[in-house]
Image (cartoon, rainbow, N blue to C red):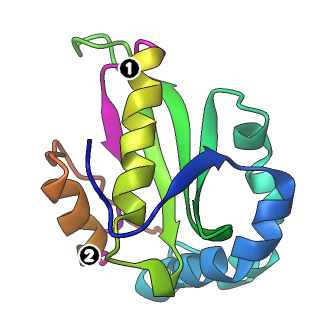
Amino acid sequence: MVQYHMKIDIRYLNEKDLDVLEDDIREMWSKHHFNNKSLISEDILKNTNLHQYFKRSIKRQKGFSLIAMVDEQIAGIIRVAQEPLEDFFNYKKAYIVDDLVVKTKYRRQGVATALLDKVKEIAKENGIGVLKARIYTFNEPAQDFFEEKGFDQLYGEYFNTLD
């Protein structure tokens, strides 16, 4: 078990949590637009209804979202979706880790690690043998984090806009 510098409690996301995290989530999303303007619409990101976006994970339908709490304050969130893997994989299902956001004042203090550790625990309980992480190419801190946690890059996705 990893020891953190502070007590971090992990629980499932509820609707009210989104109001506290909205600015942090939208800030992360805006980085996606600024680094991929031809593919990602700033207007759509700004107008995306977070409650609708996280609805399935709140209801724990083919995934879930977790919240990290420090001193009764929300410190971070992670969204996980369950997806099938192609037939040639040894495992048939994976958890896709997405939307990992840690509030600025809690970064580099074990919050992301605590969230990921809880995802691993839930995966094992549910017979999931593979975690995948969806990370944009510009997000080097996230790439470094997942590599430090034992994730290997298996492939990349390439996009070509046809405008």
Which residue carries the number 1 mark? 124
Determine the residue positioned at 38% across, 48% down. Answer: 116
Read off the magenta span: 126-139
Q: How far is disc 2 from disc 1 in space, using C-alphas?
A: 26 Å
Report x, y in % for residue 140: 23, 75
Numbered badge on residue 112: none
Report x, y in % for residue 110: 34, 65
Numbered badge on residue 141: 2
Report x, y in % for residue 7: 47, 61
Taking depth in this image into account, of 8 and 66 the one nearest to the observer is: 8
Report x, y in % for residue 90: 22, 11
- Asked if residue 125 lies left or right of residue 120, the reply is right
Determine the residue positioned at 40% across, 53% down. Answer: 114
Q: Is residue 41 visible?
A: no
Task: Name the amino acid type tagged 1.
Answer: Lys
Q: Are marks 2 and 1 in contact (CB under 8 Å)?
A: no
- Asked if residue 98 lies left or right of residue 153, the reply is right
Task: Name the amino acid type tagged 2.
Answer: Pro
Q: Residues within 10 Å of mark 2 (few under 14, many from 20)?
A: few
Q: Quadrant of residue 161?
A: bottom left
Taking depth in this image into account, of 124 and 84 the one nearest to the observer is: 124
Taking depth in this image into account, of 38 and 53 the one nearest to the observer is: 53
- Asked if residue 43 lies left or right of residue 113, the reply is right
Taking depth in this image into account, of 93 and 124 the one nearest to the observer is: 124
Q: Is residue 120 above or below residue 30?
A: above
Determine the residue positioned at 52% across, 29% down. Answer: 82
Instruction: Determine whether the residue tagged by mark 2 lies in a helix, strand or loop.
Output: helix
Q: Is residue 83 above or below residue 112?
A: above
- Asked if residue 1 lies left or right of residue 64, the reply is left
Dot 2 or dot 1: first in sequence order is: 1
